[in-house]
Amino acid sequence: AQSVSQHNHHVILSEAASLELGCNYSYGGTVNLFWYVQYPGQHLQLLLKYFSGDPLVKGIKGFEAEFIKSKFSFNLRKPSVQWSDTAEYFCAVNAGGQNFVFGPGTRLSVLP
Amino acid sequence: DAGVIQSPRHEVTEMGQEVTLRCKPISGHNSLFWYRQTMMRGLELLIYFNNNVPIDDSGMPEDRFSAKMPNASFSTLKIQPSEPRDSAVYFCASSLEGVGPYEQYFGPGTRLTVT
């Protein structure tokens, strides 16, 4: 069965700091990869997705993620975070069909 | 597009009462998912439907939970009888499964509190 792990439960950064959130998955075949963001009190929204092609994917709000197949990783990055990036971030993996597995989430707190 | 619509947004009920949560997926989407989110367990998939048919309900906690999708534009998640440990935010999501990959669109959630 697929599984998704996220390295950090809670990350605390100051504004303008760089961000990298780790995501690893366990599945040997072709996967589709997603990062979702959940702002406080809101629903999950798609941040970015990787289906094929360039392994460096750019999403909304200055976020990007890099798919490294050999490491089974899809880490999320942002060069300079803002207070408004405070949210919970979920990595998700789809290995075809409707089998969609979410990671446990990483809570990001950005201090002004 | 109105997005995925869920009702009610908040529900407070007493233990033992029946609770019904409702979801309207995005028009044209053919797959619908029910998730539960708690601090302790994170985001859990309860059940999903494809073309109104339940495909995988292995995440449904126990017989007190049931879900239906009578047509392509409506689904319900029912808890009977409810218990305090059912308190959580319940999300509905929909997607269009077809040729090629897809993504899930989430509704605003229903925050359920069982006292």
Image (spheres, rainbow, N blue to C red):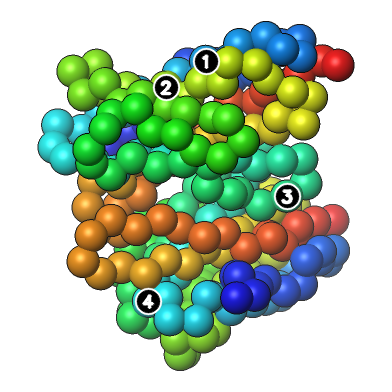
Q: Quadrant of the C terminus of chain B?
A: bottom right
Residue B73 % position (x, y)? 51, 85
The amino acid pointed to by label 3 is Gln
Task: Pick whichever, B89 or A72, lies toward us.
Answer: A72
Q: Position of residue B9 (x, y in %)?
A: 78, 66
For the residues labelled 4 and 1, the Cα–Cα distance comes to 35 Å
Residue B86: image x %, image y %?
Answer: 67, 54
Chain bearing tag 4 is: B
Q: Which residue is labeled 4 in the image?
A: B30
Helix or strand or loop: what does disc 4 sit on? loop
Under tag 3, what secondary structure?
loop
Q: Chain of mark 3?
A: A
Q: Whole-Å distance between the Cαs marked 1 and 3? A: 23 Å
The tag on residue A75 is 2
The residue indicated by pointer 1 is A20
Q: Is residue B11 above or below residue B45?
A: below
